[in-house]
C-alpha cells in the first residue's frame, strides 16, 4: 500500500473515532462532566507517558514546557475548555450544536489567521466565512438564542490551533505536555468532588479509564496520517468528524432538528464546499508551480 493511501486510512480512522465519540460519552451521562474531564486528562497522561517512555522521549515533555512556558499552559486551558463543553453538550442532548461547532471551526481558524496573524484571505474564503456568519445569525434569529455551544467549541479549538502553531512539536508530544499541565487540576477536582463515580462501579471505572486511549489513539493516527497526506486532503477528510457527530445526534440520540437548523446547516455545508474546493484548487496550482520550477531548474 502506498504511503499516501496509508495516510488517508489513518486520517479516516482518526476522524471516525472523533465523530463517533458522542456514543462513548453518552454512556457516561450519569457522571458529571467535570469528573469525566478529570479522568480523561489523567488517563490520557498515563497513556502518553507510557508511550513516550517506550520511545525514550519522556524528557522531551519537560523540555517543551521549558521552551514554551506560556503557549503550553494556554493551549492546555483552551483544550480543556473544549473537551468540557463537548462532553457536557453530549450529556445534555445538544450534540447537534457540537457538530455545528466543528463544521465552522476551520472557517473560524481562517478568520483568526486574518485577524491575529494578518494573513490575507482570498475572495472565495471571505464568501465562505460570510456564509457561516449568515448561518449563525439565521439560527440565532430562528431559535431566539445564539448557538453558544457551537461558537465556544469553534472559538476554543481555533485559538488552540493558534497556540499550537508556536510549538515545534508533534501532536503526541504537545498534548502530553498539555495534559501534564492539567493533571494537578484534575487531581484536585477529583479530591474536591470526592469522585463518587468510577470508584465503586466497575463498568463506569472501565469507561473512564478508556477515555485515555480514546483521546490518545486518534492523535497518534492523526500524526501518522497528516505527514503522508496533503493539507487540502486532510482538510476535506476532517469534515467526517462533525458529519458523524451530526448523524449520531439526529439518528441515534433523536435530538430535535428544526427547519432553522436545516437552513443554517445547508448554508454552512455550502460554505464548507466553497472553502474546500478553493483549498484544493490552490494546492493544485502550488503543485503545478513547484513542478514547473523544478523542471526549469533541471533544464
Image (spheres, rainbow, N blue to C red):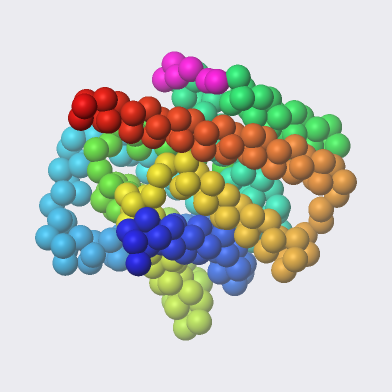
Residue furthest out toward the bottom: 202
Q: Can residue 40 be seen? A: no
Identify whether 173 is placed above or below 195: above
On the rendered structure, is 47 left or right of 32?
left
The prevailing secondary structure element of the residues shown in magenta is loop
On the rendered structure, is 19 left or right of 47?
right
Seen at 76% across and 42% down, the residue is: 266
Q: Quadrant of the N terminus?
A: bottom left
Q: Quadrant of the C terminus?
A: top left
> Residue 22 is drawn in which quadrant?
bottom right
Seen at 32% across and 59% down, the residue is: 3
Of the pair 274 and 61, the residue shown nearer to us: 274
Magenta highlight range: 117-122
Q: Can residue 22 be seen? A: yes
Task: Please provide percent x and percent y for residue 262.
Answer: 81, 46
> Residue 194 is drawn in which quadrant?
bottom left
Seen at 13% across and 52% down, the residue is: 59
Identify whether 154 is placed above or below 21: above
> Residue 87 is drawn in which quadrant?
bottom right
Of the pair 111 and 124, the residue shown nearer to us: 124
Seen at 35% across and 37% down, the residue is: 164
Task: Please provide percent x and percent y for residue 92.
Answer: 69, 58
Task: Please provide percent x and percent y for residue 221.
Answer: 37, 60
Amino acid at each position: 500500500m502506498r504511503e499516501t493511501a496509508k495516510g488517508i486510512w489513518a486520517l479516516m480512522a482518526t476522524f471516525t473515532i472523533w465523530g463517533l465519540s458522542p456514543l462513548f460519552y453518552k454512556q457516561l451521562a450519569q457522571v458529571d462532566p467535570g469528573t469525566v474531564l478529570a479522568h480523561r486528562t489523567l488517563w490520557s497522561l498515563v497513556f502518553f507517558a507510557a508511550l513516550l517512555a517506550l520511545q525514550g522521549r519522556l524528557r522531551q515533555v519537560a523540555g517543551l514546557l521549558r521552551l514554551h512556558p506560556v503557549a503550553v499552559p494556554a493551549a492546555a486551558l483552551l483544550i480543556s475548555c473544549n473537551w468540557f463543553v463537548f462532553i457536557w453538550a453530549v450529556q445534555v442532548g445538544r450534540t447537534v450544536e457540537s457538530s455545528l461547532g466543528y463544521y465552522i471551526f476551520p472557517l473560524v481558524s481562517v478568520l483568526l489567521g486574518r485577524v491575529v496573524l494578518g494573513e490575507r484571505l482570498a475572495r472565495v474564503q471571505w464568501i465562505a466565512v460570510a456564509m457561516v456568519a449568515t448561518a449563525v445569525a439565521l439560527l440565532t434569529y430562528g431559535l431566539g438564542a445564539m448557538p453558544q455551544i457551537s461558537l465556544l467549541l469553534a472559538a476554543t479549538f481555533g485559538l488552540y490551533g493558534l497556540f499550537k502553531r508556536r510549538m515545534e512539536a508533534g501532536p503526541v508530544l504537545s498534548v502530553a505536555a498539555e495534559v501534564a499541565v492539567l493533571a494537578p487540576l484534575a487531581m484536585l477536582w477529583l479530591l474536591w468532588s470526592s469522585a463518587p463515580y468510577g470508584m465503586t462501579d466497575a463498568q463506569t471505572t472501565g469507561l473512564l479509564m478508556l477515555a485515555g486511549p480514546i483521546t490518545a489513539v486518534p492523535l497518534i493516527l492523526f500524526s501518522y496520517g497528516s505527514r503522508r497526506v496533503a493539507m487540502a486532503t486532510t482538510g476535506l477528510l476532517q469534515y467526517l468528524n462533525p458529519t458523524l457527530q451530526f448523524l449520531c445526534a439526529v439518528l441515534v440520540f433523536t435530538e430535535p432538528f428544526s427547519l432553522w437548523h436545516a437552513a443554517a446547516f445547508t448554508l454552512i455545508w455550502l460554505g464548507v464546499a466553497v472553502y474546500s474546493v478553493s483549498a484544493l484548487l490552490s494546492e493544485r496550482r502550488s503543485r503545478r508551480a513547484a513542478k514547473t520550477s523544478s523542471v526549469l531548474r533541471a533544464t
